[in-house]
Image: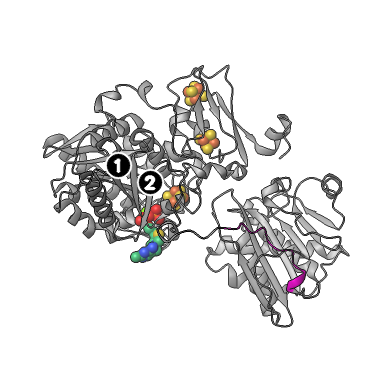
């Protein structure tokens, strides 16, 4: 059985890519499962999708724990613990990554034992993030070695019908070009045997004590528990306030931030809560003194010496 | 509870924000921007009764951004839910189970799909019964949570998931403000996050009154309207400056415009920022539809000025 796990952010064509791959397998005569993990499918939020394909019926269910291939549509997710990209990866797992950095650098940085292939972001046909997902599906299809170019091409046509003609053609070309690009490599994704349920590590269950009848409704007794969710991970651009330029106007940034992620400190200066700021950049556009600048998230965390 | 006099200038606006961060709303959500501004003023002594829509995702067990209560109802029946909560609170007060000062404000929270369509009957009934509640509709002009199909709030010519043709949505946005006002409730107002002082004054006024009080917030929606999230507030300001979104209130039987744009910008300044209107500009300029849209806005303001 083949098990391919996709990682990316909302808006990068991850869900579509997984469906195209599933469709291609199906057209080739495989039994297929393809499903995104349901969650907040919001622009920038980390998302996951899973494809299983087998010549025999598939009885495995749920998220893919031990992938044969991990597809990462956005390299800014690599160091994010919540994205859990390397979870369950073994020596035989191939990592396919959209990144402008050389593969060796990632292998070294993340101690990857198996193969890792990088598709440059800047490549032709990869101008928009949606096309990164398309580039990935083309490359994976080829690296599997069991799907023909024609089968992929049909699957693209079938799954991209909802796009307008020009966009569908562009997406399709991007995928097929990546397919061709991979012809030069010897690396192949290898299937692995069907795993017995007993060999799976048990999930981290939380035991809930039984309550009395009137209390068993799913009521939340604490305030603002949403703050436990780190929506800062959605950010690809980071707003940074220069307090030497800020004139503490009437705190427009703080009022307008849709998240309520900017507080005013005791000296009257606005402070951004980066654990929750989603990087919409409303504040950057609204500050009358232009005191807020947008930096690429990766660059910003490098500058501030953070390990994310 | 705040009184209307608390907000004279922008400096009086809250600097501490009490709606929790970490919600699953899209980056740049104009509805969330309005809600957080409103919540800062309404505070935690509130019960939100939320009909299905994007905002129901705010509270997915065990997470919630609210500090007070929140309750989920079916799409058509949030005002009926509010009646039940109000009655329960009143009974608890009569029984002495809660003190007067521990009473809660009951606030219906729905999208336009509910407010303009599915839930309008329940709303009408609640106003007829003079229910003591606030109704807050965040109007993103479509069924957002299910992929932005058109609703009765969708403006003429807009592209949605169910109006994809070259002419967009053939219908016209329903005038919900007037429908609500025709019931003669205690208060009706239009608001928008991009005008926080006007919003704060209206929320404070609504809080100081009792009976049915209804608030309609235009909610720029980057996902459904296809624009970059950073433009969310800018688009809201343009909606007011072009006269697309008149800021007004109905109180004591009269409609008063609270912010009349001195020199109205051409409506194109608003439309061209949004992908949902792209087809009016590309590949050819649809002069006829653009003029029609402008004419309707001009006619509205002509009536405001001369009647
Ligand atoms: C009776 C009923 N019909 C359909 C649905 C599915 N549904 C859930 S959210 C939603 C969209 C609601 O649109 P709106 O009220 O404008 O809120 P928005 O999603 O735009 O925030 C729909 C149709 C439902 N929950 N209940
Ligand atoms: S980018 Fe600015 S406005 Fe947007 S969430 Fe972050 S702090 Fe708030
Ligand atoms: S909007 Fe700009 S000037 Fe005003 S408080 Fe924020 S950073 Fe300072
Ligand atoms: S779809 Fe629109 S209204 Fe719904 S959360 Fe996203 S931005 Fe807000
Ligand atoms: Mg809506």
Task: Name the one closer to the observer, B156 or A204.
Answer: A204
The residue at which mark 1 appears reads as B104
* Discs 2, 1: same chain: yes
Above or below for A235 versus A56: above
Helix, strand or loop for disc 1: loop
What chain is tagged by disc 1?
A: B
Q: Which mark is residue B69?
A: 2
| Distance from mark 2 CB to nearest ligand 1 atom below 8 Å | no
| Distance from mark 1 CB to nearest ligand 1 atom below 8 Å | no
Residue drawn at 55 percent across, 50 percent down: A43
**Rounded to the nearest whole Å, what is the CA distance between mark 2 and mark 1?**
9 Å
Asked if residue B159 shows in the view, the reply is: no
Mark 2 is surrounded, within 10 Å at the Cα level, by few (under 14), some (14 to 19) or many (20 or more) other residues, namely: some
Residue drawn at 74 percent across, 68 percent down: A3
Horizontal side of A10 relative to A111 (left or right) equals: left
Task: Name the one closer to the observer, A104 or A262.
Answer: A262
Q: Which mark is residue A279?
A: none
x, y percent for residue A168: 59, 64
The image's colour scheme reads one colour
Asked if the residue at tag 1 contacts the one at tag 2, i.e. Cβ–Cβ closer than 8 Å, the answer is: yes
Segment colored magenta: A197-208
Helix, strand or loop for disc 2: strand
Above or below for A96 versus A68: above
Horizontal side of A260 relative to A203 (left or right) equals: left
Label 2 or label 1, whichever comes before in sequence order: 2
């Amino acid at each position: 059985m083949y098990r391919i796990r996709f990682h990316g952010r909302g808006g990068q064509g991850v869900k579509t890519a997984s469906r195209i791959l599933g469709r291609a397998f199906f057209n080739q005569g495989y039994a297929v499962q393809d499903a995104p993990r349901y969650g907040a499918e919001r622009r920038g939020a980390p998302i996951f999708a899973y494809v299983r394909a087998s010549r025999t019926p598939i009885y495995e269910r749920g998220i893919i724990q031990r992938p044969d291939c991990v597809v990462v549509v956005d390299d800014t997710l690599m160091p994010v613990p919540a994205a859990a990209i390397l979870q369950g990866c073994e020596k035989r797992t191939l990592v396919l990554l959209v990144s402008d950095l050389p593969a060796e650098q990632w292998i070294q940085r993340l101690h990857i034992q198996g193969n890792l292939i990088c598709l440059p972001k800047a490549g032709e046909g990869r101008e928009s993030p949606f096309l990164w997902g398309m580039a990935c599906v083309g490359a994976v299809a080829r690296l599997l070695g069991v799907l023909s170019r024609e089968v992929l091409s049909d699957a693209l046509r079938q799954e991209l019908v909802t796009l307008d003609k020009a966009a569908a053609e562009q997406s399709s070309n991007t995928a097929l070009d990546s397919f061709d690009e991979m012809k030069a490599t010897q690396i192949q994704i290898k299937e692995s045997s069907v795993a017995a349920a007993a060999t799976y590590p048990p999930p981290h269950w939380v035991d809930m004590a039984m309550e009395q009848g009137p209390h068993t409704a799913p009521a939340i007794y604490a305030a603002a528990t949403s703050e436990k969710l780190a929506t800062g991970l959605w950010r690809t651009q980071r707003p940074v306030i220069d307090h030497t330029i800020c004139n503490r106007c009437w705190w427009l940034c703080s009022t307008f931030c849709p998240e309520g992620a900017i507080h005013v400190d005791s000296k009257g200066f606005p402070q951004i809560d980066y654990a929750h700021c989603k990087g919409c950049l409303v504040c950057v556009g609204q500050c009358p003194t232009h005191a807020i600048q947008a930096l690429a998230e990766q660059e910003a965390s490098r500058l501030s010496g953070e390990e994310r | 509870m705040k009184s209307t006099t608390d907000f004279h200038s922008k400096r009086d606006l809250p600097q501490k924000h009490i709606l929790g961060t970490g919600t699953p709303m899209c980056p740049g959500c104009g509805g969330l921007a309005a809600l957080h501004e409103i919540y800062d003023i309404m505070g935690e002594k509130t019960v939100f009764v939320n009909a299905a829509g994007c905002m129901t995702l705010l509270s997915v067990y065990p997470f919630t951004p609210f500090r007070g209560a929140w309750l989920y109802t079916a799409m058509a029946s949030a005002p009926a839910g509010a009646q039940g909560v109000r009655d329960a609170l009143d009974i608890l007060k009569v029984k002495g189970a809660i003190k007067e000062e521990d009473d809660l404000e009951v606030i219906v929270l729905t999208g336009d799909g509910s407010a303009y369509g599915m839930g309008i009957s329940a709303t009408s009934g609640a106003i007829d019964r003079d229910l003591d509640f606030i109704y807050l509709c965040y109007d993103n002009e479509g069924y957002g949570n299910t992929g932005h199909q058109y609703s009765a709030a969708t403006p003429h010519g807009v592209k949605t998931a169910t109006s994809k043709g070259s002419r967009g949505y053939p219908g016209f946005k329903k005038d919900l403000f007037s429908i609500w006002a025709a019931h003669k409730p205690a208060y009706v107002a239009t608001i928008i996050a991009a005008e926080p002082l006007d919003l704060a004054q209206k929320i404070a006024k609504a809080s100081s009154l009792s009976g049915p009080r209804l608030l309609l917030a235009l909610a720029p929606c980057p996902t459904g309207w296809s624009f970059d999230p950073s433009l969310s507030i800018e688009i809201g300001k343009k909606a007011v400056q072009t006269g697309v979104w008149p800021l007004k209130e109905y109180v004591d039987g009269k409609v008063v415009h609270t912010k009349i744009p001195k020199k109205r910008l051409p409506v194109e300044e608003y439309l061209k920022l949004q992908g949902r209107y792209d087809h009016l500009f590309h590949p050819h300029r649809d002069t006829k539809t653009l003029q029609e849209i402008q004419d309707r806005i001009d006619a509205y303001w002509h009536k405001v000025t001369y009647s």
